[in-house]
Image (cartoon, rainbow, N blue to C red):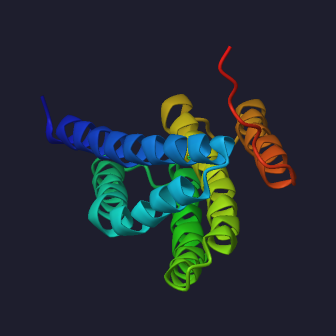
Amino acid sequence: MDVYTIFKFLHVLAAMAWFGGGAVMLLQAILAMRQGDDESLMRVTGSLGSLAMLWFLPASGLTLLFGLVIVLLGNLWGEAWVILGLVGALASFVVGHFFLRPMGEEAARLIADGKIAEAAVFGSRMIRIAMVDYASIIAIVALMVLKPNWTDILALVVIYGALGVTAFLILGSKARLHPLRAE
């Protein structure tokens, strides 16, 4: 076993922690939205803020760090999948820092003022944005696994076309998620 393989393992492990932790939180929020339970939704979105510094930021930072080590060791700087993956990671950081964090702070302020229903509006928007962010992370995973080069137009169109359609369906929908029905 070589150093490259060790860092590739650490990269994948950190990515699993980042994606898996967020996926569970996102599922909890979607279930709260479907149940129409504003208080549960706000508990979940509130915990997203505290977990951001404790879990998501370190896990995503380690994913990036170990990935950069792999790129250096493998001399992969010109590869399409590396460059596009880095752009995707930067986009995820921007979404989290400049959109989700301020929305979470505003929701927390509204909760402190006793305005749960208004805070839930922010919570619902946050979850929709987080859903698109997770779709973009899935696109990054597809890039890392498929490793398309600049001439693999079909693979790139499929990856980014699926991301675009997903974003349109999530953000373009004004309807609240429908409640789950026990049958």
Q: Quadrant of residue 39?
A: bottom right
Horizontal side of residue 55 vs 108, given as left or right: left
Asked if 70 appears above or below 64 in the picture, the reply is above
- What is the x, y in percent for residue 93? 51, 67
Q: Residue at x 77, y 36 (%)?
A: 153
- What is the x, y in percent for residue 150? 67, 44
Q: Residue at x 62, y 56 (%)?
A: 127
Give the camera-side residue of 128 and 140: 128
- What is the x, y in percent for residue 1? 12, 28
Give the camera-side residue of 111 and 84: 111
Q: Residue extending furthest left?
A: 1
Asked if 155 appears above or below 102 in the picture, the reply is above
Q: Residue at x 77, y 31 (%)?
A: 154
Give the camera-side residue of 127 and 43: 43
Q: Residue extending furthest front?
A: 114
Asked if 94 appears above or below 131 in the picture, the reply is below
The C terminus: image quadrant: top right
Q: Residue at x 70, y 37 (%)?
A: 159
Horizontal side of residue 34 vs 52, given as left or right: right
Give the camera-side residue of 92 and 36: 36
Horizontal side of residue 94 vs 150, given as left or right: left
